[in-house]
Image (cartoon, grey):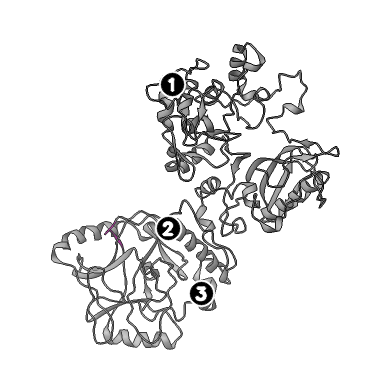
Amino acid sequence: HDSTGLGLSTAEDSKYVIATPMRGWNSMIPDNDRVNEWKDPRACCLCRTCGDDDAGLPPQDNPSRALIHQTFFDQAESESEKPNVASVGRLLPMSGGMWVHASCALWSSEVWEASGGVVNSMDKARSRGSQLKCFGCGRPGATVGCSKPNCSSNYHFPCAKACGAVFTSNQSMFCKSHASHAVDLAQMASFEQMRPLSFDNQIAADGDQIDECFEKDSYLRIGSLTVHSLGAIDEKLGGFHSENYITPPGYIATRIFWSICKPKTRTVYVLKVESVQGNAVFSATPGDDPGAEVRGRSADKVYKALLKLVHTANRDHFSHGDMFSKLPMLRNFEKRAYGLNGAQFFGFGINTIRRALETLPKVEAVVTPLSKDSPSYNFCFVQPEMDLVMDLQRKRAAVAAEKALENPSGCARTEGHHAVLRSGGSGRITRALVKSAGGDAQTDTSGRKTIQEETQADRDSNQRKYKEMKSVPLEDRLAALRSHIHGWGLFTKVDIKKHGMIIEYMGEVVRQCIADKREKGYEESGIGSCYMFRLDLQRIVDATMIGCMARFMNHCCQPNAYAKVINVDTENGADKKIVVFANRDIAAGEEVTYDYKFPVEDGSLKCTCGAPNCIGRMN
């Protein structure tokens, strides 16, 4: 991709000089050194020749078509009879690690191109070509058939051109014998397709193929860019992405581009993204001068600095405003209407690489800002799982809440009352009364809600579940830990199935009048949070001073648990118990939450659960 204005140029004698394509490192080794000679091992699955074919070069100077070229030149009796062998274009990657030349694929009889450069039916062409031999060279893989009905001529694409076949603008080929039937011949100096091309079977499984490619320690190549490592996303660092690009530390790629040392010469640049003191640093190191590394805080800055060095190296090859000079003019970069940008130069601005980066582990970190100033990446191809995003948000919120405390020891006795105030404990809730998940709750005259009692059909099942729950010590099943929602939360240590019992809400059982007095006393004494749970119309369970870990359950607009009053047989006879059930499968380490279902009172109670359907308040 010529994005620097370095096309055909002239030296001082005003003769045009062509910048020869870079094919390996053969120009850097002696002519008689065959040991270190570089050869492209990639072979086209149709014509069987190796390497990319650079259109525009004389056929005899292109080693990638030496076999076909030599075949026809040996058959020619005179210099005038030597055929013109067409260029087959660049190699395109196919599924299964195979390659095919662009022209070999597009001119095959079965193949057709859809919008967006998607090539279809390539597998059918390859299957038919394996059974047909070329009428020109006699080797298998002939897929370019004559469009004249009843003509059995089939060729490789370069063989068809060499045998005198003609090509039309509607992607048809007519052999030499039927060339007179061709209408609207294709007038093109080169058959090279200067546009992105991909195969239909790559679109659906593109992400899977990219993942497999890097798992096998191979590389992803797109044109002159080769990605050696996608890097790894660190969820603790927030400066390695923007709204449009993911630039993970450890990203390594190489690109063939113009040299900053030698004019009209290409070289390989090693492109890296590194972490320096937690900040992203981009670098481009030229292969012909490793000491001239270009570094910067953004890909655009590195690319612009590199272009200036390239122009400096080629300053004698521009006209510099001389209207009578044959030298080209320097393009105006301010228009920004052509060429690469920094992200595309490094690779993470190319759609194929962007798709691969969006499938990296911990990619949810780029959509969860570490701070208010951190950008949030806009996904284009693969959306992260919402559960992973929510888990990371909760994790980061819990870390932030931990840092806000003066004494994050985890022990309430050592933190004192001022730590509770800083964590938002005061004013958090005035009562912890919930609505039953089994149906609408009843409401008494004081506004407190009762929990709907169980049906008789569930009594035996609840009795069995209650005994099983009590048989396992509470500390083996649950733990009170720091929560991203608020202060402390109740977390599970074991997996709990849907509708399984989690914990019994225990505390002092008091009458209605006592509960009213205690609630007023708690508010006057500065205890902002009281934990009262209605058992029935006459009794209330107060866990404010005496209770268990159930009191640490936080509110959530999308809860994973619900409360229910059940009847169980105890040593003192039948009794009512408040038990918390799981309304879905709860994994070990997950926080237990339920919906408080507060009535609308004086002012709104802020909700910080972070659920997708959170309305921002608890009442």
Please say if the residues under marks 2 and 3 sit with CB atoms less than 8 Å apart.
Answer: no
Q: Quadrant of the N terminus?
A: top right
Alpha carbons under labels 1 and 3: distance apart: 73 Å
Q: Is residue 594 visible?
A: yes
Q: Nearer the viewer, mark 2 or mark 1?
A: 1
Q: Secondary structure at mark 2?
A: helix
59, 555: nearer the viewer: 59
Residue 432 to residue 497: above or below = below
Q: Nearer the viewer, mark 2 or mark 3?
A: 2
21, 458: nearer the viewer: 21
- Magenta span: 498-502
Q: Image quadrant of residue 43?
A: top right
Alpha carbons under labels 2 and 1: distance apart: 47 Å
Q: Image quadrant of residue 450?
A: bottom left
Q: Secondary structure at mark 3?
A: loop
Residue 130, label in figure: 1
Alpha carbons under labels 2 and 3: distance apart: 27 Å
Q: Residue 329 appears at what percent x and percent y? A: 76, 49
Q: Secondary structure at mark 1?
A: loop
Q: Residue 380 appears at what percent x and percent y? A: 49, 54
Query: Majority secondary structure of the magenta segment?
Result: loop
Q: Amino acid at mark 2?
A: Met
Q: Amino acid at mark 1?
A: Ser
**Badge 2 is on which residue?**
386
Q: Image quadrant of residue 619?
A: bottom left
